[in-house]
Amino acid sequence: MLIVCAEPAVVESELGAGLLSCPSCRGVLARWGWARERVLRCAAGTRLLRPRRARCRACAGTHVLLSEQGLLRRRDAVVVIGAAIAANVAGDGYRPIARGLGVPADTVRGWLRRFAERAGLVRAHFTRCAVALDPELGPLLPAGSGVADALEAVAVAARAWVLRFGRAEAWRVASRLSGGLLCNTSSLFPVVG
Ligand SMILES: [Zn+2]
């Protein structure tokens, strides 16, 4: 599983040019058909995505190339999940957040609970990402709580990404940097560096 750009044409050209590397061994990935279609719920409605499947030329492992618009095993767009996390850190409860986003309350509660459980891991991972992207970066200041610290680390890493690679949506960057695991149970974040 690898998180890639949201733009299918870019993914195709990167695959064709051998620019995507295997998350297991860093070998070159080549096209290997398509994964099953999946529905992504976005703020503006649902989108049907057909992720590319790729095979590593070195280790022969196959990987689904998930769009940075989503997260692994989440049906909602990362921008929507991120908005809920940011609103919660700002003090809103899950019910008003869910009403505002038009998402079931239990779904929002699940995201927030998972993010809170993982706040320490998320902070550590995104701090490493931020420093890898910008070695000049100063220390991150405490933001007042575990989840606020984690959100701050995500924001700082996303800013460092934009400074290095150009304009990008912060939560999509967060999806990419987390390997889709921002709000998952797995602690196996991608290796940084
Ligand atoms: Zn490989």
Image (spheres, grey):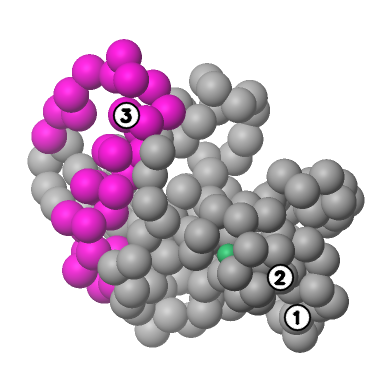
Which residues, given as a range, are shown in magenta?
Answer: 113-142
The residue to which callout 2 is attached is: 55
- Residue appearing at x 76%, y 85% in the figure: 36
Amino acid type assigned to the residue bearing label 1 in the image? Ala
Question: Could you tell me what secondary structure mostly forms the magenta stretch?
Answer: helix
Residue 78 lies, in percent from the top left, at 54, 59
Which element carries disc 3, helix, strand or loop?
Answer: helix
The residue to which callout 1 is attached is: 35
Check disc 1: other Cα within 10 Å, few if <14, some if 14-19, many if 20+: some
For label 2, being within 8 Å of ligand 1 is answered: no
Q: Which of marks 2 and 3 is nearer the N terminus?
A: 2
In the figure, residue 46 lies in which quadrant? bottom right
Which element carries disc 2, helix, strand or loop?
Answer: strand
Residue 98 lies, in percent from the top left, at 45, 70
For label 1, being within 8 Å of ligand 1 is answered: no
Q: Nearer the viewer, residue 35 or 98?
A: 35
Which element carries disc 1, helix, strand or loop?
Answer: loop
- Residue appearing at x 59%, y 69% in the figure: 59
Residue 57 lies, in percent from the top left, at 70, 64
